[in-house]
Image (cartoon, rainbow, N blue to C red):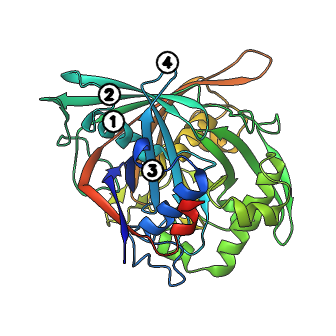
Amino acid sequence: MSVLSIPAVWMRGGTSKGLFFRAQDLPAEPAQRNAILLRALGSPDPYGKQIDGLGGATSSTSKAVIVGPSERSDADVDYGFAHVSIDSPVIDVSRNCGNLTAAVGPFAIATGLVEAVEGMTEVRIWQANIGKRILARVPVRDGMPVEEGDLQVDGIPWPGAAIELSFLDPGGSAEAPLLPTGRRRDRLDVPGVGKLDVSLVNAGNPTVFVRASDLGLSGREQPAEIDADADGLARFERIRAQAAVAMGLGDAPEVVSRERPATPKLAFVAPAADDRASSGVPIRSQDMDLLARILSMGRLHHAFPGTGAVALAVAAAMPGTLVNEMTPWAGQGGERRTRICHPSGLLEVGAEVTSDGNGWRAHQVIMRRTARRLMVGQVLVPMRGLDRQLDG
């Protein structure tokens, strides 16, 4: 059987893993490229294991990134993200992955797409999915990204070198403004659920925020608890899909569920309270600003996605949102650093948000993550079933 042999790097960025490609090594035609990405990661797999591909059978590990030189004067590289469904032949490109964004700069430097500057290299990234600029400050030694360091990110067992990410003007996109409905709080009437208060925020990625208490939850739930409740997951999806329509991201809830599984995200939040991380480590209420959990591709995220953290930090700095009301500075906003307690521990994210009387603007969001290369080589993709798409 003939196979395609394609240069690729398997990388961890933050609490996600993905298969990284240079743009020149994949077909430019979307259908051809998607066929390769699906097969490389092992999707669709009706058994839900991605056993015949590199995907890890979770929303955090079934991802691909494509990076190439940018023609923009304000960017060094263009970065495209693909979230690959595990059990269906669907690739969602409606969003960015904030965690894997941390690996884009190191990948660009290591593959020669960006010239290394000894000490610290600033990589200007154009995030093509959502049309936003991101600055990554990557430590460099002897012309290569530094991977070992002292920054411990909860959800990752080993520390690494700190990469600072600045998400510039992250509010809004071509699809929807920062506040898609123009309001900081809405009331949805969700079939099978009832009326529910929500805050709909489009920053980093579109995200739906709900009070944990309104769902009968504490905000301290772990993935195993949520994912084992099929009825609860179905309820979350009804809320997410209805909110997507309200945000202008889909014509009907059933269309959203079928064609747009990755965004918007659905998060539930609660005031700070003593918690325990999935590792068993206790977390004190005084060390956090609020509790938060978020769903990704129909399952509870094991930590907190980077772009979800961008949206949460912006909402936390905006008086009048459900997120802001959970924080110690409820009713105030501006420039805030929010300490998020998630299933794996804590994450601190800074956001600067202002209102000029005509609306709200998120100026930037800053967070620190780690990244490293896990494997460098060739991904082997069987040609069977691909040949007609690649020829066409």
Dot 1 or dot 2: first in sequence order is 1
Which residue position holds label 4? 74
Rendered image: mark on residue 114: 2
The amino acid type found where label 2 is placed reads Val
Q: CA distance from mark 1 to mark 2?
A: 5 Å
Seen from the viewer's position, the closer of residues 36 and 54 is 36
- Asked where in the image residue 367 lies, by quadrant, the reply is top left
- At x 32%, y 67%, the residue is 280
Residue of label 3: 26
- Compute the Cα span from label 1 to label 4: 16 Å
The answer to whether 297 is drawn above or below residue 184 in the figure is below
Q: For the residue marked with disc 1, what is the amino acid?
A: Ala
Residue kind at label 4, given as amino acid type: Asp
Q: Where on the picture, by quarter, is residue 165?
A: top left
Mark 3–mark 4 distance (CA, rounded to whole Å) = 24 Å
Q: Which residue is mark 1?
A: 108
When the figure is inspected, residue 69 is found, relative to residue 385, above or below; the finding is above
The N terminus - image quarter: bottom left
Say if mark 1 contacts mark 2, CB within 8 Å: yes
Judge by depth and name the residue closer to the eye, 272 or 40: 40
Amino acid residing under circle 3: Leu
- Pointer 3 or 1: first along the chain: 3
Give the residue furthest to the left: 142
Q: Residue furthest bottom?
A: 47
Q: 105 left or right of 229? A: left
